[in-house]
Image: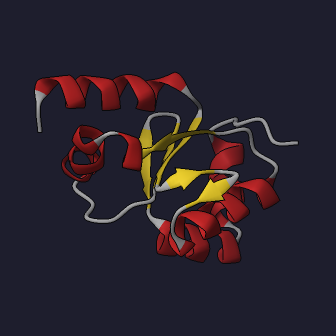
Amino acid sequence: MTDDAQGRIATAVQSADVLLFMKGTPLFPQCGFSSRAIAILDHLGVEYATVDVLQDQGIRQGIKEFSDWPTIPQLYVKGEFVGGSDIMMEMYEAGELAELLDEKKVVRG
């Protein structure tokens, strides 16, 4: 990963309380996993930012190294890596994702 890509990823991770690196956009997700991640965040009523990895090859590859996680989407809460779509779904179903958001004092609507 280039220093430039790592710097842009680090800046993005710190720029929002909840950040999702995904394929596509919230209105037009480009894979089922990204669509599921958006649905979970929307259902929890949390404000979040997204980064479309399809728009930047450096970020698309770099995020996998940054988090040491091989797949996209990837969720960050308050700068900490949470996991991918499957982990998000497991945490959501167990009530753990809502608990994490509350512990981190993320505003939910």
Q: Position of residue 90 (x, y in %)?
A: 57, 77
Q: Position of residue 87 (x, y in %)?
A: 49, 71
Scheme by which the image is coloured:
secondary structure
**Residue at the image position 22 percent from the left and 30 percent from the top:** 5
Q: In the figure, is residue 8 to the left or right of 98? A: left
Residue nearer the viewer, 69 or 39: 39
Outermost left residue:
2
Quarter of the picture holding the N terminus: top left
Q: Position of residue 97 (x, y in %)?
A: 64, 60
Q: Is residue 36 above or below residue 2?
A: below
**Residue at the image position 55 percent from the left and 66 percent from the top:** 88
Quarter of the picture holding the C terminus: top right
Figure quadrant of residue 98 = bottom right
Q: In the figure, is residue 109 to the left or right of 107? A: right
Q: Is residue 82 above or below residue 31?
A: above
Q: In the figure, is residue 69 to the left or right of 46? A: left
**Residue at the image position 77 percent from the left and 55 percent from the top:** 42
**Residue at the image position 80 percent from the left and 60 percent from the top:** 43
Q: Position of residue 12 (x, y in %)?
A: 43, 28
Q: Is residue 64 above or below residue 7?
A: below
| Circle count | 0
